[in-house]
Image (cartoon, rainbow, N blue to C red):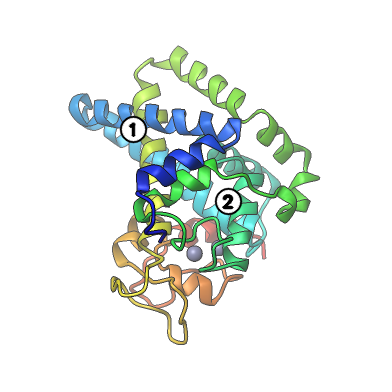
């Protein structure tokens, strides 16, 4: 971590040099966190069930299964309709477009624990890693096949228009659904993904979780994150065996994402 400057100063400088969509994403996340507070104060249990279903769509099917295991690593094959549906879930989950996410994620694996790693703790303050991930410019050339994919390019180019259309649709169904089915689960998804980057990767001297045998990099398995992040929290296992869609290895490493993958995979 850069100890010469405060977290706030680093964040302020990153914001100043950020691209336009990064700033919009930051605004969306601030709104999402306000909505989460509103839901905590005013939400009914039925609305919370709706929020958890949406979280399953955005974090589970969107981020974990589609953005990460399918598009970033091509670790399994599935029908095209599921890939498209999962991609849209990932878009609404607001961790960036599929092309941005996959490019950043591939850089993460390639430059693990080095400054060029977008998720690295080397230059980013601990809990703020995901803020920088949103704000940083990223070379999209790490996802050339997605740049050629018309659907993925459409979701990249019209990312915020898709969000506006989705919000409008929910507004017509139930105005408060924007809080419990859109913004609040988006905030939960952001915090879950942020936890993976800042807890399931650890600074030297920090000792939470455990590593897959033979692993010496910063990635660790954190049981709590394994459960709430649909298997992604068994993160050291993933870095050990990148192309395996099954992240949980031991019988007790529950991998909810893989349970869903088993239903749709065709190989
Ligand atoms: Zn990965
Ligand atoms: Zn990682």
- As drawn, the residue found furthest toward the right would be 148
- Give the left or right position of residue 65, taking residue 205 as reference: right
Are there few (<14), some (14-19), or many (20+) residues within 10 Å of tag 1? many
For image coordinates 54% across by 61% down, the residue present is 262
Circle 2 is placed at which residue position?
66
Marks 2 and 1, how far apart at CA: 24 Å
Residue 109: percent from left, percent from top: 58, 66
Q: Residue furthest left?
A: 41
**Residue drawn at the location 34% of the way across and 60% of the way down:** 225
Which type of secondary structure does the marked residue at label 2 adopt? helix
Please provide percent x and percent y for residue 195. Answer: 37, 55
Q: The N terminus lies in which quarter of the figure?
A: bottom left
Q: Position of residue 254 (x, y in %)?
A: 37, 66
Work out whether mark 2 precedes mark 1 in sequence or the reverse, and give the earlier one.
Answer: 1
- Asked where in the image residue 231 lies, by quadrant, the reply is bottom left
For the question of whether residue 163 can be seen, the reply is yes
- Classify mark 2: residues with Cα within 10 Å, few (<14), some (14-19) or many (20+): many
Q: Which is nearer the eye, 256 or 29? A: 29
Quadrant containing the C terminus in the rendered view: bottom right
Please state which of residues 155 and 259 is positioned toward the viewer in this rendering: 155
Residue 93 visible in this rendered orientation of the protein: no
Residue 198, picture quadrant: bottom left
Q: Nearer the viewer, mark 2 or mark 1?
A: 1
Question: Which residue, given by chain and number where applicable, does mark 1 sit on?
Answer: 33
Q: Residue at x 71, y 48 (%)?
A: 140
């Amino acid at each position: 971590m850069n100890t010469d400057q405060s977290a706030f100063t680093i964040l302020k400088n990153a914001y100043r040099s950020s691209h336009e969509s990064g700033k919009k994403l930051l605004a969306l996340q601030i709104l999402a966190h306000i909505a989460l507070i509103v839901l905590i104060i005013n939400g009914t249990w039925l609305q919370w069930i709706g929020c958890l279903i949406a979280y399953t769509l955005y974090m589970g099917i969107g981020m974990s299964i589609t953005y990460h295991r399918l598009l970033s690593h091509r670790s399994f094959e599935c029908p095209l309709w599921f890939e498209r549906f999962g991609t849209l879930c990932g878009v609404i989950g607001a961790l960036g477009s599929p092309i941005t996410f996959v490019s950043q994620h591939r850089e993460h694996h390639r430059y693990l624990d080095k400054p060029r790693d977008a998720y690295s703790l080397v230059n980013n303050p601990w809990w703020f890693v995901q803020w920088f991930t949103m704000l940083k410019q990223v070379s999209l050339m790490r996802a050339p096949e997605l740049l050629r994919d018309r659907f993925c390019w459409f979701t990249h180019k019209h990312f915020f228009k898709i969000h506006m259309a989705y919000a409008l649709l929910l507004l017509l169904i139930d105005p408060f659904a924007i809080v419990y089915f859109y913004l609040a689960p988006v905030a939960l998804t952001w915090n879950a993904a942020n936890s993976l980057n800042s807890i399931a990767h650890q600074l030297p001297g920090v000792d939470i979780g455990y590593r897959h045998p033979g692993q010496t990099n910063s990635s660790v398995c954190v049981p709590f994150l394994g459960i709430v992040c649909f298997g992604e929290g068994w993160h050291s296992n993933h870095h050990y065996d990148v192309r395996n869609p099954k992240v949980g290895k031991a019988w007790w490493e529950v991998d909810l994402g893989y349970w869903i993958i088993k239903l749709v995979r065709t190989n």
